[in-house]
Amino acid sequence: MLLVLLHGCTQNADDLARGSQMDRVADERGFLVLYPEQSVQANPRTCWNWFDAAHQSRDAGETGLLAALIAEVMSQYPVDTKRVHLAGISAGAAMAGLVAVAYPERFASLTSASGVAWRSATTVGAALAVMQRGAGEKLATAQDVVGAMGATRRALPVLVVHGTRDAVVSPANADETTQQWIGVHQLLRASAGLPALKSAADESETVNGYAVRTSRWREPSGTVLIEQVRIEGLGHAWSGGSTAGTFSDAQGPDASRMIAAFCALHRLP
């Protein structure tokens, strides 16, 4: 398995590796992690340019560059092509969502941590507004997402993780990301004559003082295809990580293990 993990603004690959401690989980479970890194030449704050229309489509800008990088790594290492997963935090989560929609046939799942929905903004001003309160009525529809996928359309399994006290990216974005992908699943399932996903009762637990609420949507066989984890009290941070990295909170549920477990459930058909 290969997990592609994208950092957020002001971070780099080493920073996210330290903060998420994903390498430790990868060593335990036997998978590879690729940490692509944005350059200061491309963005002074090392943000992925998710808010720029030039980087939001297949074979265009950073989506195309990331797809090419992933393909190059896969040619050099023994990677199961049916078990390549995308994840990111903040701006990295936004870019991971764009790559997933641009190349849905290549990835087995998507994880958005403290991120925004697909193509929520196409300008810097719009991006700042979305981060503060979500896309609202301007949220792209499931039809928009499926249309952008084109002939390679596929409903990816999606995990959404967000803290309720995130002051950088409003938790409203977690609901919008979840809503958007549920819509994609229901639309494609209906067109294929398959029964709709069903929501299960929310599950709640307390981990190191944080109340955690998990919502899931399953197909009839019981497989979880959409999962949203809301962590009460968590800010704009990687939950359960290490303070050796930025934007990381050592308290709360271990997001890295959560992501690894979700990825393990899914592979390309």
Image: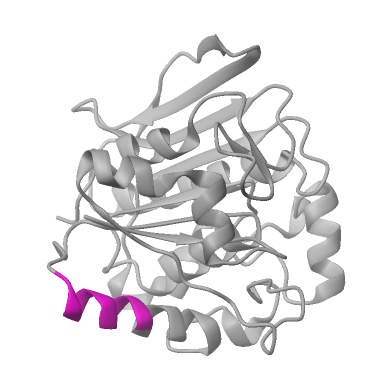
Q: Nearer the viewer, residue 162 or 156?
A: 162
Identified at 58% across, 39% down, the residue is 242
Q: Position of residue 243 (x, y in %)?
A: 64, 40
Residue 244 forms part of the magenta stretch: no
Left or right for 266, reference 164: left
Locate the N terminus and report the quarter of the image it occupies: bottom left
* Residue 77 appears in the rendering: yes
Identified at 73% across, 40% down, the residue is 172
Q: Main secondary structure of the magenta part?
A: helix
Q: Position of residue 41 (x, y in %)?
A: 69, 89
Left or right for 15, reference 73: right
Residue 75 forms part of the magenta stretch: yes
Up/down of 97 relative to 66, above or below: above
Which residue is situated farthest in the front direction here?
244
Say which quarter of the image contains residue 260.
top left
Identified at 53% across, 62% down, the residue is 14
Q: Nearer the viewer, residue 180 or 34?
A: 34
Q: Nearer the viewer, residue 185 or 232?
A: 232
Say which quarter of the image contains residue 170.
top right
Q: Position of residue 214 (x, y in %)?
A: 50, 22
What colour scheme governs how the chains and residues are painted in the rendered image of this protein?
one colour
Up/down of 262 relative to 115, above or below: above
Up/down of 78 relative to 52, above or below: above
Locate the C terminus and report the quarter of the image it occupies: bottom left
Q: Which residues are magenta?
A: 69-77
Identified at 82% across, 74% down, the residue is 124
